[in-house]
Image (cartoon, grey):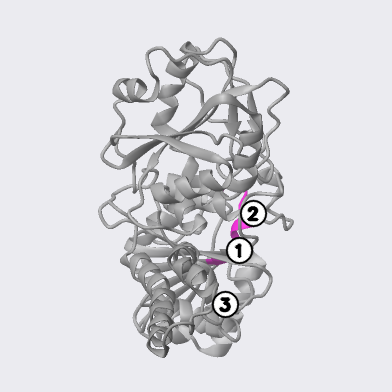
Amino acid sequence: MTCMKCGLRRRFETVVRFPILVAVCILLVLFMLGPGAIPADFARNASAAEASAAADGRQASAAAPQRPADRPASIRALAARLDIAPGSAVADIGAGKGMDTWVFADLVGPTGTVYAEEITEGNVKTLRAEVEKRKLAQVRPVLGRDDSPNLPPDSVDLAYMRYVYHHLSKPREMLREIWRSLKPGGHFVVVDRLPGTLRDWVPREQRASKHFWLAETTVVREAREEGFCFVACADELCESKDNPFVLIFQRPEDQAEPGLDPDPLVPLATGAVSEMLLAADKRFQRPAIMALGQARELIPAILERSSGAGVEIVLEEWATQKDERPPLPAGILLPSALTDLGIADLGSEPIDAVFFLDAYHLLFHGPALLNQLHQRLAAGGCVFVLDREAKQALSRREASHHRRIAPETVKQELAAAGFVLISESPAPAKDRFLLVFGKAKPE
């Protein structure tokens, strides 16, 4: 099952084509005016239009429409996006005093249902009193727990959380129960802050009673691993100016239980991929490795070719706790370093190979990490990038959350950091690509 949306392609094509058409029209007008009408530097600027337009296309999500005027307008914009209408069922998880609940109640009407969930008796009692006062028979206050919203299974079209997720002390248990409460194809929306990667490395049990803002990368990883399909970033639907993120997920229609990856990568034939990745006569002294999922099975083959211990770079875009590390293959010991805004403590020993194995797409802090790796990579060293291919350029957030990236994006980013493409291998799997880079020679 794929979680990509055709809207991404339409948005990219619109953003890319418009600047190019404008440049072409101006050139035609100037040509008809005769020789000398084109300024000396215009041709150079116009010839760069396509490249800059492609870059704009990759960042199309940043050119968001105007935000809603207020919080009720935000709820209505979200409902319109997700086809919430009279008769729909919505769960407002962590409803508080019902600020969003009353808007949802108006949207779903008397034939719909709004579950207003809270985890304390006092809050639920307050909600019940307000429901009676407003005479909203479609609103049902619910007493939840820290690990479950206590909703009926397969009952809601939308589960909604606003500034609640960062308080979850048992997020995975809660996610499974939310998944079960959704109808197949139903949506789960998280509004929280701050966008990007985790900065407050606070144990989850300490988050329940105090605001420690979470990362969007943490939410996406936990939701995906508990069975949700990532649909889109929708920050433009939130009225807040406090740097929020809005993430839309979906319960797959063809999945019976939570806890399964709804968009798995194609399995790798690790033996064959090892042969593609590692030339028979190639030896390393100290490789730096970033590997996720099944690609971690390639680590032993890399270390067998290494005379030194190597180092694992743990990406902050992946980690949900400061001491979290992906499990190593049996019998493997590998020192590790967690990145901090893209920078890793790699010690003083030189590095002669870098491996991004199903990990490059995650990068939010790519320039910082790539520049560091360029400085540390020995002359003659190589950078290997094995990843899942996106068929069109995506923004950095979209690439990270969809777990795929366009090869051209990788080439452009590595080139900007001072690397040169050495080789482009045949596809290691149906959905993968493999690129090898070296350091550019100084001019």
Q: Secondary structure at mark 1?
A: strand
Most foreground residue, 210 or 252: 252
Which is more N-terminal, label 3 or label 1? 3
Where in the figure is residue 174, as x and y percent of width and height? 51, 52
- Name the amino acid type tagged 2: Leu
Q: Callout 1: few (<14), some (14-19), or many (20+) C-alpha neighbours within 10 Å?
A: many
Label 2, on which residue?
214
- In the picture, the disc for residue 128 is 3
Label 1, on which residue?
192
User: Relative to 155, does residue 167 appear above or below in the rendering?
Assistant: above
**Mark 1 touching mark 2, by CB under 8 A?**
yes
- Name the amino acid type tagged 1: Asp
Residue 59 highlighted magenta (yes or no): no
Which is more N-terminal, label 2 or label 1? 1
Q: Secondary structure at mark 3?
A: helix
Gap between marks 1 and 2 measured at Cα: 8 Å
Where in the figure is residue 351, as x and y percent of width and height? 61, 23
Foreground tag (1 vs 3): 1
In the rendered structure, which segment of residues is drawn in magenta? 161-170
